[in-house]
C-alpha cells in the first residue's frame, strides 16, 4: 500500500475512543472493551477497514478487532467509525509481529489476513504474514478450534502460504485459486478494498482456510 504521511493521524488515533491504546494492557481481557462477551475475530493488516466494518455490521454476535500498522491508513477506518459507530468493532495500531504480547493463549477465535504484503524477496520471507514464523505466533493466541482465513490475488504468495501450512504443523481445510467462481467458498464473501480493485482488473482471487 502506498503511504502518505497524513498530518495529525497519530494524534487522531490517540484521541479516538475506537482505537485501543496500550493494547498489551488488555492481554487476556479483550472482552472488557466490548459491550457483549462473544467470540473474538481479528483482521491483521486491515488497511482502510472496509472488510472488517462490513463483517462487524453483518455479524453483531462476533467481536472484531482490526489491526493496522500505519496510523495514516487506520485513520480512514476511524473516520468511518465516527460516522457509523459499531459496538462490536475496535481497532489497534500496531505491528502484527507483536500479537503474542497483546493476546493471551486461546483468546482469538479467528484470524483474517487479506491481501497481505507479499515481501517478494526470499530474505524477507519471514515477514510474510503467512510465514511459519507468523503461524507460530498465531498458535500462541488462537483457540484450539479456531481458524485462519487468507485471501490474495498474488499467486506466488498463495503458493508459499500453502507450503507453509504443513511446515507450521497446521492443516489446510479448503482452498481455491478462483474464489469468485467457487460457489461454496464464495458464499457470504465480503470483499476487501484490494479484492474489489484487483478482481475488477480480471485477477482471480485465491482463498485458503487453515486450522490446527
Ligand atoms: N486488507 C486490506 C485489503 O485487502 O484491502 C489492505 C491490504 S494492504 C495490501 C496490506 C495492509 O496490511 C497495509 O495497510 C499494511 O500497512 C498492513 N500490514 C502489513 N504488514 C503488517 C503488519 N506486520 N502489522 C500490521 N499491519 C500490517
Image (tube, rainbow, N blue to C red):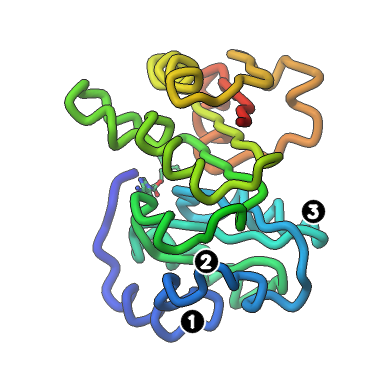
Residue 76, image x, y percentages: 47, 64
Instruction: Report the front residue among 101 and 178.
Output: 101
Residue under the point 60% across and 36% down? 148
Residue holding disc 1: 16
Residue 144, image x, y percentages: 66, 41
Q: Nearer the viewer, mark 2 or mark 1?
A: 2
Residue under the point 45% across and 63% down? 102
Mark 2 and mark 1: span between their CA atoms? 10 Å
Q: Secondary structure at mark 1?
A: loop
Residue 156, image x, y percentages: 38, 15
Residue holding disc 2: 91
Any atom of ligand 1 within 8 Å of the CB at mark 1? no
Give the side of residue 75 with respect to residue 124, left or right.
right
Residue holding disc 3: 58
Give the side of residue 81 with respect to residue 8, left or right.
right
Q: Earlier in the sequence, mark 2 or mark 1?
A: 1
Question: Quadrant where the C terminus lies?
Answer: top right
Amino acid at each position: 500500500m502506498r503511504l502518505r504521511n497524513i498530518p495529525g493521524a497519530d494524534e487522531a488515533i490517540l484521541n479516538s475512543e475506537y482505537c485501543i491504546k496500550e493494547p498489551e494492557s488488555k492481554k487476556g481481557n479483550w472482552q472488557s472493551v466490548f459491550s457483549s462477551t462473544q467470540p473474538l475475530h481479528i483482521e491483521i493488516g486491515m488497511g482502510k477497514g472496509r472488510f472488517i466494518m462490513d463483517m462487524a455490521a453483518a455479524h453483531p454476535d462476533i467481536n472484531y478487532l482490526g489491526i493496522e500498522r500505519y496510523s495514516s491508513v487506520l485513520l480512514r477506518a476511524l473516520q468511518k467509525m465516527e460516522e457509523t459507530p459499531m459496538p462490536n468493532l475496535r481497532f489497534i495500531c500496531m505491528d502484527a509481529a507483536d500479537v503474542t504480547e497483546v493476546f493471551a493463549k486461546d483468546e482469538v477465535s479467528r484470524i483474517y489476513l487479506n491481501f497481505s504484503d507479499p515481501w517478494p524477496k526470499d530474505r524477507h520471507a519471514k515477514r510474510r504474514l503467512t510465514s511459519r514464523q507468523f503461524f507460530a505466533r498465531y498458535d500462541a493466541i488462537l483457540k484450539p478450534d479456531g481458524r485462519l482465513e487468507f485471501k490474495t490475488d498474488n499467486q506466488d504468495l498463495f503458493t508459499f502460504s500453502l507450503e507453509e501450512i504443513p511446515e507450521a504443523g497446521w492443516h489446510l481445510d479448503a482452498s481455491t485459486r478462483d474464489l469468485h467462481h467457487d460457489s461454496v467458498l464464495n458464499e457470504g464473501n465480503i470483499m476487501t478494498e484490494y479484492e474489489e480493485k484487483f478482481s475488477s482488473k480480471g485477477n482471480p482471487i485465491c482463498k485458503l482456510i487453515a486450522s490446527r
